[in-house]
Image (cartoon, rainbow, N blue to C red):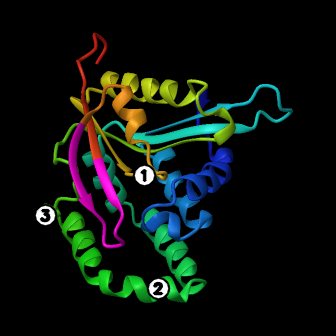
Amino acid sequence: MRPAEHADLATTARTHVEFLPVGLFPSLGAGFVRRWHRTYLDSRHGVGYVVTDPTTPDGDVVGFLLGTTDQAAHMAALFADRRALASLAAAGAGALARRPTLARQLSSRAVPWARQIAQRRSGQPAPSDGIAENPQVAVMVAVAVQPQWRGSGIGAELVRRFVQDAQRAGAAEAELVTPVGSAGATGFYERLGWELGPCWHTRDGDELRAYRQRLAATADS
């Protein structure tokens, strides 16, 4: 395991789209997801790790994790970064231009999303998205392991590393959201001892579950 680098983003994006397909961002394609993943590597509150296969010549990435050690601070910094927002907007517009059916489906959601962005940029509280508001909550955004490596302990080790780094950064709690069913990992997180939080359905009919874990302060936090 090592910290994720910009050179890994093409692989993490493809892996995300293939194995974590639920939600808007994966539907926009690997190009958009790659730019979205980059915002975590470029953030002082972001964390990213990859696990590589030492038996391959180039050390192929077989698993990755992305998240934040302080979700509120990460989002505030992102919405203040005009260059990052412009890059994401351009990538999203290009993806929608190549997917007119998806663009029509999303047209009804444009107004609430625009309102949420405006609220975040103006400092107003945004509507709840299913994750509790907290200025020092770490959020695990994406974890994926190639199928042939599942059951090897890679996923559990990625999560352990995330929790450890979140504790060191002073987070009081860690949270994540995963779909129910084959696209999700509810059983995996329950076996790791994560506590079930809110459950809800998306506009597309997918059932999502939030999980949380309270973090004890570490000596060097």
For residue 156, above or below residue 47: above
> Magenta segment range?
196-209
Q: Residues within 10 Å of mark 1 (few under 14, many from 20)?
A: few
Quadrant where the C terminus sits is: top left
Q: Residue furthest top?
A: 219
Quadrant where the N terminus sits is: top right
Q: Determine the residue positioned at 46% across, 62% down.
A: 84
Q: Determine the residue positioned at 31% across, 80% down.
A: 109
Q: Residue furthest left?
A: 124
Q: Amino acid at mark 2?
A: Ala
Q: Residues within 10 Å of mark 3 (few under 14, many from 20)?
A: few
Q: Determine the residue positioned at 38% across, 60% down.
A: 81
Query: Circle 2 is placed at which residue position?
Result: 103
Query: Circle 3 is placed at which residue position?
Result: 124
| Position of residue 201 measured from the top left corner of the image (x, y, whole percent) | 27, 63
| Position of residue 79 measured from the top left corner of the image (x, y, whole percent) | 32, 61
Callout 2: SS: helix
Callout 3: SS: loop
| Position of residue 111 measured from the top left corner of the image (x, y, whole percent) | 26, 83
How far apart, in angstroms, are the residues tagged by discs 3 and 1?
35 Å
Query: Circle 1 is placed at which residue position?
Result: 181
Q: Residues within 10 Å of mark 2 (few under 14, many from 20)?
A: some
For residue 87, above or below residue 101: above
Res 44 visible: no
Q: Residue furthest right?
A: 57
